[in-house]
Amino acid sequence: MAGAEESGRLAREDGASLAWRRLRGAGPTIVFLPGFRSDMEGSKAMHLAAFAARRGQAMLRLDYSGHGASGGRFEDGTIGLWSADALRVIDAVTEGPVILVGSSMGGWIGLNIALARPQRVAGFVGIAAAPDFTERLIWEALAPRERETLLSAGVLAMPSEYGEPTPITLGLIEDGRLHLRLNGPIALDCPVRLLQGQRDSDVPWRTALDIAERVTGDDVRVTLVKDGDHRLSREADLALLEGVVGALLDAP
């Protein structure tokens, strides 16, 4: 069985520290990648950590800079920077194959990591995966006046149903355009599993079909949860996630 969960911090060159928690155990290592303004203490991350502990499975969860227990300012973050944060931690504290589990923005970051380290990724699970959301769901949805504010001030405070308004920076939008994934093939050959609620008010459920169509490998499955919301954190949703991850771990 796996031992107690270890925690640590990894320093970046600019001095910001990246927080992580790890369970040692059998491979492949489950790596949980949280969403935009979320962190490694969310219900899906914690559920998978408990699942890994029961199995004696290795698992890593982490916080990007400006999120959770990590250092740095959220407003300084971009898709490229947060992808690099996650890759830095994965390279430093895991060995061998990994199964990436990305929630919302974490799905986009997971795709970036899988493309950067294809030889290490044994599977990818997206939960309401949201590649290209900075362009498709933020920029394209802005009114002309909001775009003007963002372009002139460099930041726009957007209301959020999850708490305080979210600062959207011009840097986030411009950097996102360097990492778009839904405008061409996604060259992955590992097993890909996409879980998507059809009552998701944040990410259109057809995004999962778009990802599936663009992944070049054949082992791709999409599971639509008709009454599922964006979080997919109900007991039945967590059981579904556990089953999908478990099947990947048990695959020959």
Image (cartoon, grey):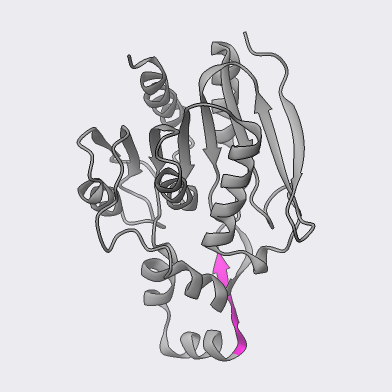
Residue toward you, 17 or 223: 17
Measuring from the top left, give residue 231's x and y in whole percent: 47, 44
Quadrant for the N terminus in the image: top right
Asked whether, in this view, residue 251 is left or right of residue 153, the answer is left
Residue 220's image quarter?
Answer: top left
Q: Does 56 lie within the magenta span? A: no
Q: Is residue 146 above or below residue 204?
A: below
Question: Which region is colored magenta?
Answer: 153-160
Above or below — where is 246 with respect to 173? above
Q: Does residue 162 appear to the left or right of 65 in the view shown?
A: left
Q: Quadrant of residue 149?
A: bottom right
Residue 42 visible in the current orientation: no
Answer yes or no: is residue 161 visible: yes
Residue at 51% in and 19% down: 27
Q: In the orientation shown, which residue stands out farthest toward the top?
A: 1
Tell which residue pokes out farthest to the right in this image.
15
Seen at 65% across and 46% down, the residue is: 63
In the foreground, 36 or 211:
211
Looking at the picture, how far across and down is residue 44, in whole percent? 53, 34
156 or 172: which is nearer to us?
172
Magenta stretch secondary structure, dominant: strand
Q: Is residue 154 magenta?
A: yes
Residue 62 vs 80, above or below: the answer is above
x and y, in percent, of residue 186 in the image: 29, 51
Residue at x-position 39% and y-position 41%: 126
Which residue is situated farthest in the front direction here?
119
Residue drawn at x 45%, y 33% as measured from the top left? 120
Q: Position of residue 192 (x, y in %)?
A: 32, 36
Give the position of the C terminus as an image quadrant. top left
Residue 14 falls left or right of residue 116: right
